[in-house]
Image: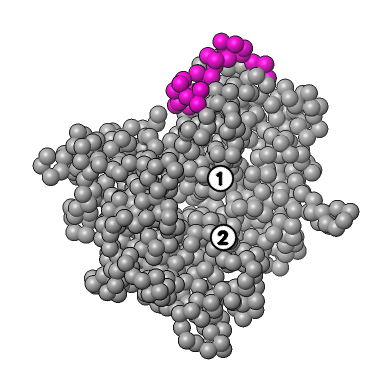
Amino acid sequence: MAAKTAPTAPGANSDVLVSVKDMKKHFPIMQGVFRRQVGAVKAVDGVSFDIHRGETLGLVGESGSGKSTTGRVILQLIKATEGSVTFEGNELTAIDPEKLRKLRPRMQMVFQDPHASLNPRMTVGSIISEPLREHNQAKGDDREQRVVELLSLVGLAPKHANRYPHEFSGGQRQRIGIARAIALNPDFIVCDEPIAALDVSIQAQVVNLLENLQGVLNLTYLFISHDLSMVRHIADRVAVMYLGRIMELTTVDRLYNHPQHPYTQALLSAVPVPDPKIEAVRKRVILEGDIPSPANPPPGCPFNTRCPMAQKRCVEEVPEWRQLRTGHWVACHFAEDTPDVAAVETVEAAEDPPSHLPSAP
Amino acid sequence: MTAQSPILEVKDLETQFHTQDGTVHAVNGVSFDLNSGEFLGVVGESGSGKSVTMMSLLRLIPMPPGKIVAGQAMFEGRDLLTLELEDLRTVRGGRIGFIFQDPLTSLNPVLTIGFQIMESLHIHTKLSDEKREARAIELLQLVGIPGAKKRLESYPHELSGGMRQRVMIAMSLACSPRVIIADEPTTALDVTIQAQIIEIIRDLREKLGTAVIWITHDLGVIAGLADRVLVMYGGLIVEEAPVGELYANPQHPYTEGLLGSIPRLDQKGMQLINIKGQPPSLYQKPDSCPFAPRCPYVFDRCREENPPLLEVKMGHSTACWWDMDNQRPRYGS
């Protein structure tokens, strides 16, 4: 493994790597011959959170909740409409492009669709070494050496460097995408639904790989997913998004055992558990209706149209983003009054997997 | 579940696709029964043959390139695979309803919801226009669509994904079928909408007693729904068991691996099992166990002979040479 550039203080888990404040991203809706703006899709409508060095922050939500947009704005792939994003104290929204380019190697992305995110005309070797070329790191033999090293880090063989993406399965392609993301020794990786397009038996392979790499390379992840079970497995803290806002943010244990926001509670209770005995006795909160359109969100709390606890105040007033207790943030007027129930009883994972089965790669 | 005689009996079904790159052996000898009123879950990954199996029953696969090479599918005393096309049409959408994965591509975008529901009533029943409309409204109410009468005039694009899937369910129910085949009906939906659809299906089953075949890749979804589960891999059924038994006591290494590889909402600190390798290529007919290259228990016989699906306990069958309970080869090899 190559020596990591810019080593970070070991054990400094609490320092903030990425900080997002009141960030908004509105996409204009244009209409008519003169392309006049007639409205805006409020994809992200004011979110604030920190990502600590070395942690995995899970960002969950249903489709259209703005989670992918949030990830892209953080990396400055699209510009924020309002608000601030800082990376190690550098304000990214107003940064000089040349300075941003210097920071790029340190923040990378793994995309959802491994078929669309790899250029079919490039060999795997050139895909993985492209970031090295782009940022003038490692030349000639060193670069080839680095590609071999990266391939082995993600569980592929050196011979794979000369092949093309179509020769690989979905899981292997995602490994290639991960190799590209770690090529420049980043500190921070946005994983945008990295397993959503993969088969069930392959998902565990990729997640185990991400977890391993995090340990080896000291990575910080923003893990965007709609799979609440997988997020429980991989994340340290979780933020729940709904219609462009974060509804609740806290540690994994608190979120899954003591969710305080009615949306989190409903969301968790909707996730099926692969165990017939539990499913037979579980109580469910079935939400009515659908997510409203982000082009025309309801006034007040965005969840008020479906909330089982909604009252007059919820329609009139946007709930404040407040800290209920240390490290437990919530945006609900009545978070104190929600019943304190977990969606399912948590059990400690049974035993280690049977010893004859292979564990992590 | 009361034991009843099966209403659908499938025997040795084989389906192949002849493509430029060679023959794809999608389904390689699948046999199963469906009892009246039963909820049968079919689990498998993409390429396991679960959808092609069910589509083959109603000959809904494109032919060519597809071809049903062998097999029998007895339904109400007739073999669906040899039935005249004219007669098969009375079964499709009439006696057997189908719900597809993606309601956006399976609904016609230029026809109203009402037209599309009433179309199948028009084909399969002799109801008058007014009766048809009344039935369509009744169906939309049944699947919980508010303002049903007004909704008949809506076009698919005016509805959300969850609403469209409800319309699909309503359409499949239109002619009071004996069997509904649902192909990943909630995969394209968000989890809170999925919960709504599952609740509707659960409710409808109690009211109507229709038998359901539910195809999915998600072991979580059918845990709370199915009576019995088939696990498919490489175009074969590798395990078949009542739902509780399957999850508590899997008898095939693939099922065991699958259950260990998915994280659970109710567990913390769980280590995910890696099922190494990739799903099998289907360009060859399996003459050995298709799971052998990925199996942690593999031994010589697995690479030589394909294990048959045999009952190892009451109602619990597995296609594996390895006895998981006793950790030794099965059938005294």
Q: Secondary structure at mark 2?
A: helix
The residue tagged 1 is A225
Q: Where residue A350 appears, x then y in whole percent?
A: 34, 43
Identify which residue is drawn at 58% across, 17% down: A4
**Direction from residue A43 to residue B186 in the image, left or right:** left
- Chain at numbered mark 2: B
- Residue A55: horizontal and vertical position, in percent? 56, 33
* Spatial CA span between label 2 and label 1: 25 Å
User: How far from the left and from the top, in percent, is residue A117?
Assistant: 60, 36
Q: Relative to residue B304, is residue B147 depicted above or below?
A: below
Q: Return the residue nearer the eye: A87 or A34.
A: A34
Asked if the stretch drawn in magenta spans residue B302, the answer is no
The answer, for residue B93, to whether it is visible in the render is: yes
Left/right of residue A293 with respect to residue A83 in the rendered view: left
Judge left or right: residue A357 versus residue B129.
left
- Amino acid type assigned to the residue bearing label 2 in the image: Thr
Q: Which residues are magenta?
A: A135-163
Residue A250 image-quadrant placement: top right
Mark 1 belongs to which subunit? A
Total numbered labels: 2
Along the viewing direction, whichever of B59 and A42 lies nearer the viewer: B59
Residue A143 lies in the magenta stretch: yes
